[in-house]
Amino acid sequence: MSGTKLVRQGGEFLQIISRSGRSCKDFKHIPSCSVSADLLPIIAEGQRLLLGYNGSHDLYAVCEEAPKILTEISENGAFATFLTSAVSEHYFRGLKKGFHPLEFNPTYEYINELRPSLKQSAAQMLSDLRLNEEEQDWMRRRYEATINDGMALLFGFEACLRTPESLRNGQYAAWNQSVQQQSSRVDETELELIQLQEQSRRLNDAGRFRILSWPYIIVFALALKFGKGVAAVKQRQ
């Protein structure tokens, strides 16, 4: 599977969240819907970038979006606080590990390491809450949905864990933009040279016409002058 296809596969993980959110956004009383519906508008841009990915020059935009989404989720309150912090921390720890771009399995294994600790944290939270059986069941299902969406989110941006820092921090994007600008300037210069050559060719053609026709112009002018002189003499006679 190509790198491009793997990156786009990340968008498919986010689609899992968005499909759930779209299909049941009016049924927030259902635990899974209450999470996905809240996440739907937040992940929209990240999903668009991942599914439309078309080369390494897009990775900066993709990976720049991940922290924004994690921050917005934290502010939105879609995840429980302990889940939000755990997902964010796991993502940023993964960036520091320096995975090789071709280390697909290690990054997937690293992401999956988080699930058991999330389940443990959710169980601890439920035990600390004083809820009746029905309320506890609702919260348990909501936590499960949150864990699934949190994992889908991490898998969505898995490619960023394998992306070299120079791509993530925009160095490559800035370099690529500079190259594009230089290339554009070269193209403009070449076009100007072509236009100058065309103008020179036209000027040379006009010059050649003037040189070749000059003797005929002189003869014609002298003929006119001689004609006028003859006419003047006849008038006097």
Image (cartoon, rainbow, N blue to C red):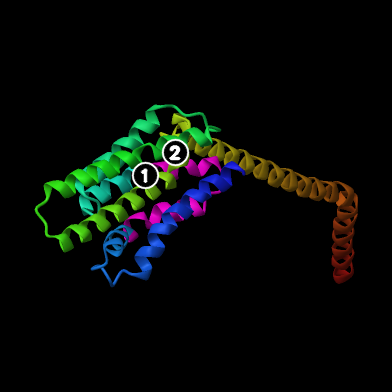
**Viewer-nearest residue: 184 or 232:** 184
Q: Is residue 199 visible?
A: yes
Residue 77 in the image, given as x and y percentages of width and height: 21, 53
- Using the image, tell me which numbered label, if any, was put on residue 66: 1
Q: Is residue 136 left or right of residue 113?
A: left
Residue 188 in the image, given as x and y percentages of width and height: 61, 43
Stretch of the chain drawn in magenta: 40-66
Distance from the alpha carbon under mark 1 to that under mark 2: 9 Å
Residue in the image at 39% along x and 55% along y: 45
Q: Is residue 7 left or right of residue 189?
A: left
Q: Is residue 26 above or below residue 128?
A: below
Kind of residue sitting beneath label 1: Ala
Where residue 204 sits, quadrant-wise, is top right
Kind of residue sitting beneath label 2: Cys
Instruction: Please tell me whether mark 1 sits on a helix, a strand or a loop.
Output: helix
Q: Which residue is mark 2?
A: 160
Where residue 134 sits, quadrant-wise, is bottom left
Where residue 6 sits, quadrant-wise, is top right
Residue 141 in the image, given as x and y percentages of width and height: 27, 58
Q: Is residue 91 left or right of residue 120?
A: right
